[in-house]
Amino acid sequence: MKVAITYHEDFGKNGFSVLRERIAPSFEKLMESGLVDGVDVQVFKAKPVPLKLVEEAHTEAHMANMQSDPYREVALLSAGSVMMAAEMVAEGKAEAAFAYTGTAGHHASRGSCWGFCYFNDVAITIQRLREKGLKRFLIVDVDPHFGDGTRDFFKDDPKVFHINFHSGSDEEHDPEKNNYDIGLTFGASNDRFLGALKSALVLARDCDFQIAFVIFGHDSHQDDYGGFNLTNEAYPRMAQIIKEAVGEKGLVFVLSGGSCIHVAEQAIPDVIRVLAGRWPS
Ligand SMILES: [Zn+2]
């Protein structure tokens, strides 16, 4: 299979209020596109992540705080979606995957969270993949908000190369720890963003990662709520650049920020079309 898509209708019904309106319409557009053929591109129903893995990743105090949170269940389901997608790629069942979510993960640290995030879906999944013997990972966080939670997990871990876009003006690369922050000032264009992405991926090549995660926030679109000024053309180009850089290794897109329905309706099927090797159609 070329692309595994993990999805659950609860993401659109019970997902975080800002994020959920885009879910069902973008999924419908994807199903209408003809891309999902049940052979090369298949959809799988997400299941909640095992609680034990979440408890290993987060502090007891954070778990206690989350106990009564109204988004707890959908956050567990979102992390489960990411894990299911990544495991299919790691096991060689799919070349690439796209995980839908109802809450985001990159602002969830070990002991706290903010910004529509509850549990760090990618960090929990990396922990799981390490149990299965994988060692080195690439995270490309293209959401325009700083992935502080993910950085909390991996700041001192040179086996996780973390490319982290954010709205700002500074660029910082720590080659010892493989942390690379790229600040793009408010209103960054497609070319500015894609150029910075290409340069960062050249540096990531030496990290010898086995699987790559893309924290895919389309809040970077000019009509959405984040800081960049991207247009629809940016997303398939971005996916193409990342796919080429990743090559034969596993690639998992994880849905992150974004609320704009028309952006999601275009960007999500476009990205999946690239992952399936059917771009341009
Ligand atoms: Zn964001």
Image (cartoon, rainbow, N blue to C red):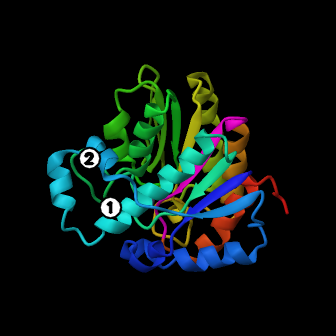
Q: Earlier in the sequence, mark 1 or mark 2?
A: 2
82 in the magenta segment: no
Q: Quadrant of residue 245?
A: top right
Which amino acid type is shown beneath numbered disc 1? Gly
The answer, for residue 58, to whether it is visible in the render is yes
Q: Is residue 280 above or below residue 136?
A: below
Q: Residues within 10 Å of mark 2 (few under 14, many from 20)?
A: some
- Residue sitting nearer the eye, 270 or 226: 270
Q: Is residue 132 above or below residue 71?
A: above
Q: CA distance from mark 1 to mark 2?
A: 21 Å
- Kindly identify which residue carries mark 1: 115
Across and down, in percent, residue 217 comes to: 51, 59
Q: Is residue 74 left or right of residue 163?
A: left
Contact between marks 1 and 2 (CB within 8 A): the answer is no
- Residue sitting nearer the eye, 47 or 142: 47
Across and down, in percent, residue 159 comes to: 46, 25
Which amino acid type is shown beneath numbered disc 2? Glu
- Residue sitting nearer the eye, 21 or 57: 57
Identify the disc placed on residue 48.
none
Q: Secondary structure at mark 2?
A: helix
Please report the bounds of the magenta region as a residue range.
Answer: 246-258
Q: Is residue 190 left or right of residue 128?
A: right
Q: Is residue 245 left or right of residue 151?
A: right
Quarter for ligand 1?
Answer: bottom left
